[in-house]
Image (spheres, rainbow, N blue to C red):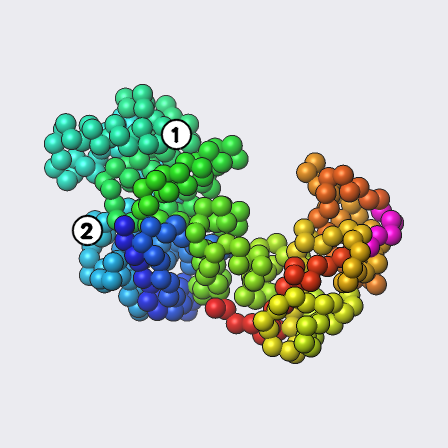
Amino acid sequence: MTAVNLIHLTKDYGTGEVAVKDMSLDIASGEMIGLLGPSGCGKTTTLKMIAGLIRPSEGDITFGGASVLGVPPEKRGAVMVFQNHLLFPYMSVADNVGFGLKMRGMSVAERRRRVSETLAMVHLTGFEERRPADLSGGQQQRVALARALVTKPRLLLLDEPLSNLDAHLRLEMRNLILQLQRESRITTIFVTHDQQEAVILSDRTALIFDGVLQQFGPPREFYERPASERVARFFGTENLFVGTKVGNRVQTVLGAFELNGVAVDDGPVTVAIRPESIVLGEAGPNRVSAVVESALYTGTGTQLSALVEGVRVKVQAGAHEGRAIGDRIVLTLPSDRIIVIPASAPPR
């Protein structure tokens, strides 16, 4: 297992746009880290710098405390699985998986043993003689994963590993990656644009916008303590309002609400509450009257849009909490679910 440190990492292609700007991350040995963000934010560039495929313009990268900037990619002990599987079409599954071992001069017997063990790990025993064209997309991705794992790397790098799979195969591969990482405890860094994927797979997530690290921490923090309004919106917080905090209360366009343990200075703030955190018709403080504007039944719940004094509020109600357009309802904003963000919260 290997700890990885990115130290003021920057990549400037000289085109007037910096792909990665002064990024620092400390990744513990055995952690699974997600690099999350929209397309073009710099996450794949960061992954390729770690792999040694791109040289940073500034900064340093260390594995186990030692800089790897002068170490060629093939000697870093970092293996990258690309979005496209890049399997050799004319080779069998076994030969694809064992190719790296063959290049290292490993004996045929030992190579066969390692390939067999690794194919069993990814549930492909019996597929040794098949060619990539005879495999499904999910099976090809498992072969690519096995080819990476068979060399027992120090670091596993995954570039959008699930993006080319349909919903069922994504779920299957996600569970497999999680299982393999937990069993091997290999330090793993993966790139994704999918919030749910990052939340499920990563021990900690690094959210990147425009090449700048916005927030780094456990997935729960992005929902409960977003560092900025933009982070909150990216993670699906639709209800955001301008407010003013004084003591343990905040004044907003919806009214004044009690807060619970919010460690934010008094003054201008952005107030946020997730749709699923709002309760329908519960007694107590922080209640407001609303009128249902729209109701969409989704099978597992009902998505409501309600108007509070002309201000739109999104609510995620239960499947059996049906409401009709025009219904008058009471919304409760639990004090411990109200998020308060300083008005000029910087990335952290």
Relative vertical location of residue 194 with respect to residue 123 in this rendering, above or below: below
Q: Is residue 45 left or right of residue 96?
A: right
Q: Earlier in the sequence, mark 2 or mark 1?
A: 2
Residue 216 position by quadrant? bottom left
Q: Is residue 267 left or right of residue 175?
A: right
Query: What span is in magenta?
Result: 325-330
- Dot 1: few (<14), some (14–19), or many (≥20) neighbours within 10 Å? some
Residue pictured at 27% horizontal, 53% vertical: 2
Measured as percent of width and height from the top left, residue 267 is found at 65, 78
| Residue 146 seen from this side | yes
Q: Is residue 236 above or below residue 133?
A: below
What percent of the width, then of the height, locates residue 266?
A: 64, 78
- Residue at screen point 68% across, 54% down: 277
- Given residues 288 and 231, the one toward you in this image is 288
Q: Could you tell me which secondary element the residue under label 1 belongs to?
A: helix
Give the residue at mark 2: 75
User: At x 38% / y 26%, what residue is drawn?
Assistant: 135
Judging from the image, what secondary structure is the residue with disc 2 in?
helix
Residue 100 image-quadrant placement: top left
Q: How many residues crowd mark 2 within 10 Å: few (<14), some (14–19), many (20+)?
A: few
Where does residue 85 sit, x and y in percent of width and height? 36, 38
Cα distance, mark 2 to mark 1?
28 Å
- Residue pictured at 48% horizontal, 68% vertical: 348
Q: Which residue is disc 1 drawn over?
A: 139
Relative to 321, is 245 above or below? below
Along the horizontal axis of the image, is 281 left or right of 16?
Answer: right
| Residue 48 visible somewhere in the drawing | no
Q: Amino acid at mark 2?
A: Lys
